[in-house]
Image (cartoon, rainbow, N blue to C red):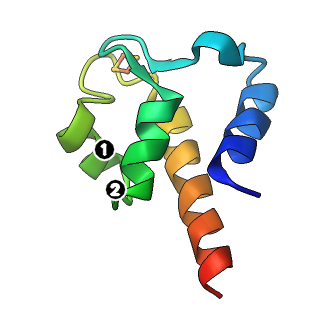
Amino acid sequence: MNCNAITVAIANTYHLDLRAMYVCLCKAITDSEIREAAETGVADVEHLTEKLGVGGGCGTCLEMAEAIIDACRANRLSYAA
Ligand code: FES
């Protein structure tokens, strides 16, 4: 399962529309931007906040941002094994 498929699964869990999936409304950051960051080395939400500002406002996005990062990391590890 690649990151896109994982994002679809997460969106389905949270009943989200993937046409415009903003994860962080305060900073206007989308799931694609988070996945891209995860695929280029961001391994946790603290680093994501440093890099993109996700969670730097109200913080309500952190759980979903972490789920996306974790899913991408798990996906990378499964391919590496
Ligand atoms: S929605 Fe991300 S900080 Fe508010």
Q: Is residue 5 left or right of residue 40?
A: right
> Which one is nearer the viewer's eye here, 59 or 23?
23
Q: Quadrant of residue 42?
A: bottom left
Alpha carbons under labels 1 and 2: distance apart: 6 Å
Q: Eyeballing the image, is 65 above or below 16? A: below
Picture coordinates of residue 18, whole percent (x, y): 69, 19
| Sooner in the amino-acid sequence: mark 1 or mark 2 | 2
Sort mark 1 into few (<14), some (14-19) or many (20+) by Cα contacts within 10 Å.
many
Q: Quadrant of residue 8?
A: top right
Q: Which residue type carries mark 2?
A: Val
Residue at (72%, 13%) from the top-left corner?
17
Disc 2 is placed on an element classified as loop
Q: Eyeballing the image, is 45 above or below 63? A: below
Q: Is residue 74 left or right of residue 55?
A: right
Q: Is residue 70 left or right of residue 10?
A: left
Q: Which residue type carries mark 1?
A: Leu
Numbered tag placed on residue 48 in the rendering: 1
Residue at (38%, 60%) from the top-left corner?
43
Picture coordinates of residue 76, whole percent (x, y): 57, 69
Numbered tag placed on residue 42 in the rendering: 2
